[in-house]
Image (tube, rainbow, N blue to C red):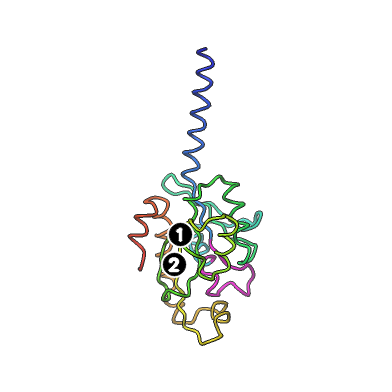
């Protein structure tokens, strides 16, 4: 009987440890399109933020199933950075795969995307909402079957003329934007770290609108 109870205790302890370990994992997904033609476009700000983070911390991305991946460890947390290789319109496929593969809770997912409705460089973190016409978020919502997931929107402004939205989104940053971008990328790194260490609510209160 004692041996049976001990086995149950050990099994329960292992389950608790697995749960605790999974809660310390975070999947940070930068949305974008693969290929040099898209590298410096506004639509690829998700890739750009993760690349900037990786450069700052001397991380190296590895090409794996459905995306490029690297891991950053910080204050007992494990941040898994993912740049999907599925192209923007199928981003959800890669996100769902890596959520399941790494056993990351949905509340520990954060998706980084561009936003036409925010002034350039403005950052806004939300826990739910519509896709807002963004194809990457549309596919994510479809694959996850929910619109309740953390998304980090980076403003690219709407400074385009009628009928030129696609050209603008897939266009490169202006010299004026480039001059301000590094500071905005550094601020984005702070937000990602805060998300994993301070939590979503404190991070929203601290960074939204900056």
CA separation in Å, label 1 and label 2: 23 Å
Residue 127 included in the magenta stretch of the image: no
Identify whether 142 is placed above or below 41.
above
Q: Is residue 9 left or right of residue 61?
A: left
Magenta segment: 30-47
Taken as a whole, is the magenta stretch helix, strand or loop? loop
Which marked residue is nearer to the observer: mark 1 or mark 2?
Answer: 1
Residue farthest along the bottom direction in this orientation? 161
* Residue 180 rendering spot, x and y as whole percentages: 41, 75
The percent coordinates of residue 10 (x first, y second) are 51, 24
- Circle on res. 185: 2
User: Which residue is located at x 47 percent, y 49 percent?
Assistant: 73
> What kind of element bears circle 1?
loop
Using a 10 Å C-alpha cutoff, classify the residue at mark 2 as few (fewer than 14 neighbours), some (14 to 19) or many (20 or more).
Answer: many
Q: Which mark is residue 128?
A: 1
Q: Is residue 35 above or below residue 104?
A: below
């Amino acid at each position: 009987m004692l041996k049976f109870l001990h086995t149950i205790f050990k099994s329960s302890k292992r389950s608790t440890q697995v749960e605790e370990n999974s809660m310390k994992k975070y999947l940070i997904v930068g949305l974008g399109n693969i290929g040099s033609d898209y590298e410096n476009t506004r639509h690829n700000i998700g890739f750009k933020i993760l690349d900037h983070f990786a450069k700052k911390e001397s991380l190296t991305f590895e090409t794996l199933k459905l995306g490029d991946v690297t891991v950053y460890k910080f204050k007992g947390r494990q941040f898994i950075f993912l740049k999907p290789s599925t192209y923007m319109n199928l981003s959800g496929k890669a996100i769902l795969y890596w959520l399941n593969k790494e056993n990351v809770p949905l509340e520990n997912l954060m998706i980084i995307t561009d936003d036409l409705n925010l002034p350039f460089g403005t950052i806004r973190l939300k826990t739910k909402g519509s896709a807002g016409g963004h194809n990457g978020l549309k596919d994510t919502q479809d694959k996850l079957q929910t619109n309740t997931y953390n998304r980090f929107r980076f403003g690219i402004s709407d400074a385009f003329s009628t009928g030129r939205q696609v050209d603008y989104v897939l266009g490169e940053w202006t010299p004026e934007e480039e001059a301000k971008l590094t500071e905005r990328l550094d601020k984005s790194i702070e937000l990602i770290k805060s998300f994993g260490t301070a939590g979503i609510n404190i991070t929203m209160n601290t960074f939204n609108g900056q």
